[in-house]
Amino acid sequence: MVYTFTDDCIIGITQIDEEHRGLFRLIGELHDMLGEDFSKDRYDEICEIVERLKQYTVEHFRHEETYMEAIDHPELEQQRQQHKEFCQKIEEMDIRSGESDQYGLVTDLLTYLVRWLYRHIIGSDLLIGKLVTVKEWKKQDDCAFREEYLTGVEQIDEEHRELLRMLGEIHHMIARDDAADKHAEIVDRLKTLHIYVRTHFKDEEDYMESIRFDGLDVHRLAHDALATRLELMDHDEFYSMSGDELAGFVEFMTEWIATHIVQMDRHISAN
Ligand SMILES: [Fe+2]
Ligand SMILES: [Fe+2]
Ligand SMILES: [Fe+2]
């Protein structure tokens, strides 16, 4: 489990990065307190940190949403929803309640906090500062694989090429005048892409395991974050998404994958 802010979390917007660091600092404090000498006398102190952490998070979400609003970021609604769910969840975890297993309650809360934050920062926040790929693609009418995507691991590079090729094709289909008639076909292609993404993540993780890559746990969390978003495709409602919704979804996926390759996959070979 990761209890510290790592470079993988840097999104490139100073204020947000600083606040994410601040969150991890509080999480670190809490983790240390739960360490060797958990005693009931320190429970008030622990509750106080948890309270500070809650307030800090709410404040941070507000800043992040304001920033996204200011730059008219397409993921704003998604982010709002995720932030809201998180706040509800930690509100429900009432660590002061009852005489029951307080240590267990705080440990559960801590695990939930860290997992959620890590996934959220890597899975969603990373895109806040990065929405350039799709715009560039549209300008140049080109979805080509670029030099900057190279990891130096042949199999991974090949799979990335294939991923981007599939995404490029879907982008073109969506941009065509007859896109509305091709709705079902576009959805089918996305489902095929989904299967490919899963295979690719698995291959990449297997490779990292084989070279005993240091950052495997963090990398897995990043993959899980996207996989969770893509599960949407397993549901029937996916077929009834409007053309615009589908286009937004594909753009999100493209940005995510391109950002992930540049920010994380490229570190695999440098291990
Ligand atoms: Fe966020
Ligand atoms: Fe990856
Ligand atoms: Fe990858």
Image (cartoon, rainbow, N blue to C red):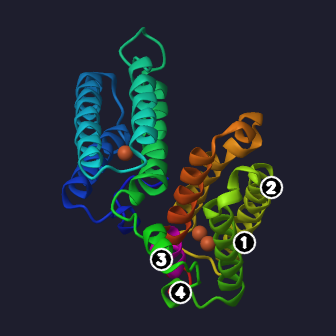
Q: Which residue is identified by label 1?
A: 206
Residues in magenta?
260-266
What is the spatial separation of the Cα atoms under label 2 and label 3, in whole angstroms? 30 Å
Looking at the image, residue 266 sits to the left or right of residue 199; the answer is left
- The answer to which of 5 and 167 lies nearer the viewer is 167
- The answer to which of 183 and 213 lies nearer the viewer is 183
Disc 4 residue type (three-letter) = Arg
For the residue labelled by badge 4, is the local secondary structure a helix, a strand or a loop? loop
Q: Residue at coordinates 48% horizontally, 40% vertically from top-left?
A: 111
Looking at the image, residue 43 sits to the left or right of residue 15; the answer is right
Q: Position of residue 134 (x, y in %)?
A: 48, 68
Furthest residue in direction top, as rendered: 98
| Front position among marks 4 and 1 | 4
Asked if marks 3 and 1 touch (Cβ < 8 Å), the reply is: no
| Front position among marks 3 and 1 | 3
Disc 3 residue type (three-letter) = Val
Mark 4 or mark 2: whose residue is earlier in sequence: 4
Disc 1 residue type (three-letter) = Asp
- Seen in the picture, residue 260 relative to 110 is either above or below; the reply is below
Q: Which residue is identified by label 4?
A: 146
Q: Which residue is identified by label 2?
A: 185
Q: Residue 225: in sight, yes or no? A: no
